[in-house]
Amino acid sequence: MPALVALLLATVVSVGTAAPQSTASAPAPKNETATEFYQRFRAVVDKAKSIDEVKPFWSTELISQFNTMPPAEQATTLDRVKQIESHFTGLKVVKETSTGSGAHIALEAFDEKTPMIGTVDLVKEQGAWKIESAEWRPKD
């Protein structure tokens, strides 16, 4: 379950713009980059009314981990993601790097006044980007 916890913590930096609720289930734009996918994810989380709007962005492994959580934890996941997401400011994608199975995105943001460094690892599943893991730490 560490990847799901890391994902929940990583969404702290999400300060995306509003997106229609249907964006989560809508097909990805043709030739969507990893960065564009992550920005779309952040926008959907911002407006989501149900965790089911967020889960399409998660890898099969993250969904499996979520499904093993007790129902009480599952019920509060969206609220926790939203709470964490609203905490960080000034999110900036610093670098996007292709990997053998997807992409690695390097991020910077602020936790109040503390500079933070984040990473998001994405995989391609059936041709679509999916979040595999994410984590944040204070910038040295």
Image: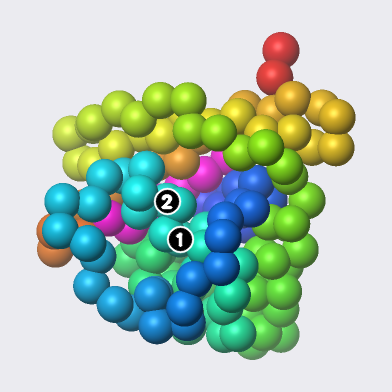
Tell me whether the residue at label 2 lies in contact with that at label 1, contact meaning CB atoms closer than 8 angstroms. yes
Above or below residue 113? Residue 53 is below
**Label 2 CA crowd tier, 10 Å (few <14, some 14–19, many 20+):** many
Residue 63 appears in the rendering: yes
What's the magenta region? 129-136
**Quadrant position of the C terminus in the picture:** top right
Instruction: Report the side of 20 relative to 78 (left or right).
Output: left
Foreground: 113 or 138? 113
Distance, label 2 to label 1, CA atoms, is 5 Å
Q: At 85% across and 37% down in the image, what residue appears?
A: 112
Above or below residue 8? Residue 74 is below
The amino acid sitting under disc 1 is Phe
Above or below residue 101? Residue 26 is below
Kindly identify which residue carries mark 2: 38
- Residue 39 at x, y percent in the picture: 45, 52
Quarter residue 62 falls in: bottom left
The amino acid sitting under disc 2 is Tyr
Q: At 16% across and 51% down in the image, what residue appears?
A: 31
Above or below residue 68? Residue 57 is above
- Residue 3 at x, y percent in the picture: 52, 51
Q: At 20% across and 41% down in the image, what residue appears?
A: 101
- Residue 76 at x, y percent in the picture: 71, 78
- Residue 84 at x, y percent in the picture: 73, 57
Kindly identify which residue carries mark 1: 41
